[in-house]
Amino acid sequence: MGDSEGRVTRSKSNDADECLIQKVVEKELSNKQFLDKLVETIKDILQVHETRLTNLEDGIVSTNNKISNILDNLEYQEQYSRSNNLRVFGLPETPTENVENTIVELCEKKLGIKITANDIDSCHRLSGKEGSQRPIIVKFCRRSVRDIIFKFKRKLKGSKIIIREDLTKRRFAVLQDLVKKFDRKSVFTSSGNIFVVISGVVKKIKYLSDLEQVMANSSKKR
């Protein structure tokens, strides 16, 4: 038998096999019991994959929540480390100034609070153009001294001098967003926490994740 005859024979054999397979498949597909079993098997497979997908989604949500909690705690600890700090804006700057003395004089002459340089742990101007009244950041030795000064900052009303808490970058961004959404009088800070007055009710934002709930509630009431 030549090569050409062998190829023809194999081709006929393959055609016969395919025809037989097609007949078997058609016969099985016409079998209702087989089809029902096939459908059930496919449903079971889909259910298994659906369960796996649900478990994966639940795992992702759980992981995201844990990450969010970790970030909140880290941010809160960073804010807590600034508990003794204040930022002072609007104080004139001179080339030969003693920043500590500037703060001591501010407290005595403008706030009526007597402190000394010994009450200040560290004190310096923040970065910016010299001569442009760069803000001053002050770290007090005691939280009680810092709190008294922050309490009496209202005496500076009407002047160009402003005293603010030393907020983290993320927390300050949240504060700015809230001021834009509400108004300056409805948003304030105390002990590093942000407070928002909504419909006469004061809402505290201790962790940044609290903001979502506060904003959601405010949207419902508006």
Image: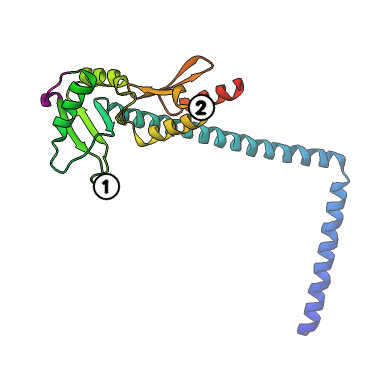
Number of numbered markers: 2
Frontmost of labels 2 and 1 is 1
179 shown above or below 96? above
Residue 117 shown in magenta: yes
Q: Residue at x 85, y 47 (%)?
A: 29
Mark 1 neighbour class, 10 Å CA radius: few under 14, some 14 to 19, many 20 or more: few
Circle 1: element type: loop
The reply to whether the C-beta atoms of the residues labelled 2 and 1 are less than 8 Å apart is no
Identified by mark 1, the residue type is: Lys
- Expressed as whole percent of the image width and height from the top left, the position of residue 38 reads 77, 42
Mark 2 neighbour class, 10 Å CA radius: few under 14, some 14 to 19, many 20 or more: some
Residue 121: name its quadrant: top left
Note whether residue 152 is visible. Answer: yes
Cα–Cα gap, marks 2 and 1: 32 Å
The quarter of the image holding the N terminus is: bottom right
Query: Which residue is denoted by mark 2 in the rendering?
Result: 182
Using the image as rendered, state which of residue 216 and residue 10 is in the foreground: 216
- Expressed as whole percent of the image width and height from the top left, the position of residue 17 reads 81, 63
- Expressed as whole percent of the image width and height from the top left, the position of residue 30 reads 88, 46
Circle 2: element type: loop
Q: Residue at x 14, y 23 (%)?
A: 119
Residues in magenta, as a range: 114-119
Residue 129's mark? 1
Identified by mark 2, the residue type is: Phe
87 shown above or below 153? below
Would residue 39 be found to the left or right of residue 165 on screen?
right
Residue 191 shown in magenta: no
- Expressed as whole percent of the image width and height from the top left, the position of residue 104 reads 16, 26
Q: Residue at x 20, y 26 (%)?
A: 106
The quarter of the image holding the C terminus is: top right
Residue 5's mark? none
